[in-house]
């Protein structure tokens, strides 16, 4: 497996690859959620490239950039064992220049939900994803459905900027007890982890209610609020696949999104219906 720190060395390597290139951008601290993206890419591509870059521009000043888990050696080992062809670990000073054009996420859809709680976050995400896609020039890039709004905004950027990469959404991976995998789960104490299970439990209960024919979003929200009452709920919201808020769930075109704080840890989860 090749390891690149230098952007232009990676570009040269990429030029020499004949066949489909799958790309999995990550911020490291790899878990089984990332591994499922990587496996998906390996299965469907001739070559797989993984990037590890904790992107400073997507963190707000009061967020966890400094304590975000960093495990570069272990991450590289995981990629090697998984059969990745190349890992790209650029430095922040190579990715960002002092003076450069900046892409801004579309106002309406990037400043609701996650974007309302973390204003500017998606500007940083799109900025780095655009750069990474330009550097790696992949055939396909793999993103998890857990970051549903991020996925939507990246798909929107790729189609409106006429980028050539195909974005492949991948299913959410959960622990056996239902907790959605996230690099931030390592912050949870045992007690908080137990409390955090109420997030996926609330989505399960909403799903059960829908199976019984309940599609009214207010009713579903109340069921979920009750289950999550020990947590600091930031939002429970229902949207269609274009991220417009909805009052009634429409099958195959809705997403239920949740963000909540458990202790100091902020978690998100969702259910695609
Ligand atoms: O989802 C993530 O891990 C990050 O937002 C991404 C897409 C790697 C951009 O930094």
Image (cartoon, grey):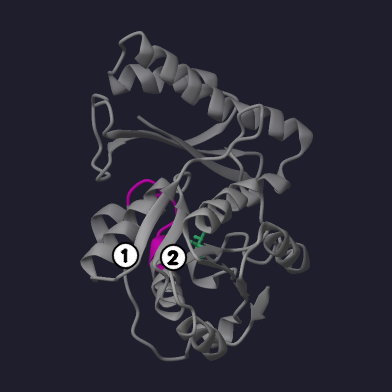
Q: How crowded is mark 2: few (under 14 residues within 10 Å), some or many (20 or more)?
A: many
Q: Nearer the viewer, residue 77 or 85?
A: 85
Q: Is residue 13 above or below residue 246?
A: below
148 or 144, which lies in front?
Answer: 144
Rounded to the nearest angstrom, the CA distance separating label 2 from label 1 is 9 Å
Specify whether residue 220 is painted magenta: no
Identify which residue, 97 or 129, lies in the foreground.
Answer: 129
- Observer-nearest residue: 223 or 156? 156
Q: Which mark is residue 105?
A: 1
Can residue 82 be seen from the camera position used here?
yes
Q: Is mark 1 on a helix, strand or loop?
A: loop
29 displayed left or right of 123: right
**Residue labelled 2 has its Cβ within 8 Å of some atom of ligand 1:** yes
Give the labeled residue for mark 2.
125
The magenta segment is 112-125
Main SS class of the magenta portion in the image: helix
């Amino acid at each position: 497996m090749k390891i690149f720190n230098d952007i232009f060395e990676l570009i040269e390597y990429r030029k020499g690859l004949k066949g489909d290139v799958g790309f999995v951008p990550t911020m490291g601290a790899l878990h089984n959620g990332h591994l499922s993206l990587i496996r998906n890419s390996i299965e469907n591509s001739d070559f797989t490239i993984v990037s590890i870059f904790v992107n400073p521009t997507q963190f707000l000043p009061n967020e966890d950039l400094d304590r975000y888990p960093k495990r570069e050696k272990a991450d590289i080992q995981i990629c090697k064992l998984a059969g990745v062809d190349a890992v790209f670990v650029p430095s922040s000073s190579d990715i960002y220049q002092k003076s450069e054009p900046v892409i801004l996420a579309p106002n309406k859809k990037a400043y609701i939900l996650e974007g309302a709680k973390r204003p500017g976050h998606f500007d940083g995400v799109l900025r780095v994803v655009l750069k990474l896609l330009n550097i790696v020039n992949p055939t396909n890039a793999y993103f998890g459905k857990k970051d549903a709004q991020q996925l939507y905004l990246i798909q929107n950027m790729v189609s409106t900027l006429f980028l050539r990469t195909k974005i492949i959404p991948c299913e959410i991976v959960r622990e056996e007890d239902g907790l959605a995998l996230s690099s931030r789960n390592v912050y949870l104490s045992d007690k908080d982890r137990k409390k955090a299970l109420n997030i996926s439990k609330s989505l399960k209960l909403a799903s059960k209610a829908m199976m019984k024919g309940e599609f009214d979003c207010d009713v579903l929200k109340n069921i979920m609020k009750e289950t999550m009452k020990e947590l600091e709920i930031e939002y429970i919201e229902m949207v269609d696949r274009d991220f417009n808020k909805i009052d009634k769930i429409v099958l195959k075109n809705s997403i239920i999104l949740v963000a909540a704080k458990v202790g100091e840890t902020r978690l998100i989860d969702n259910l695609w219906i």
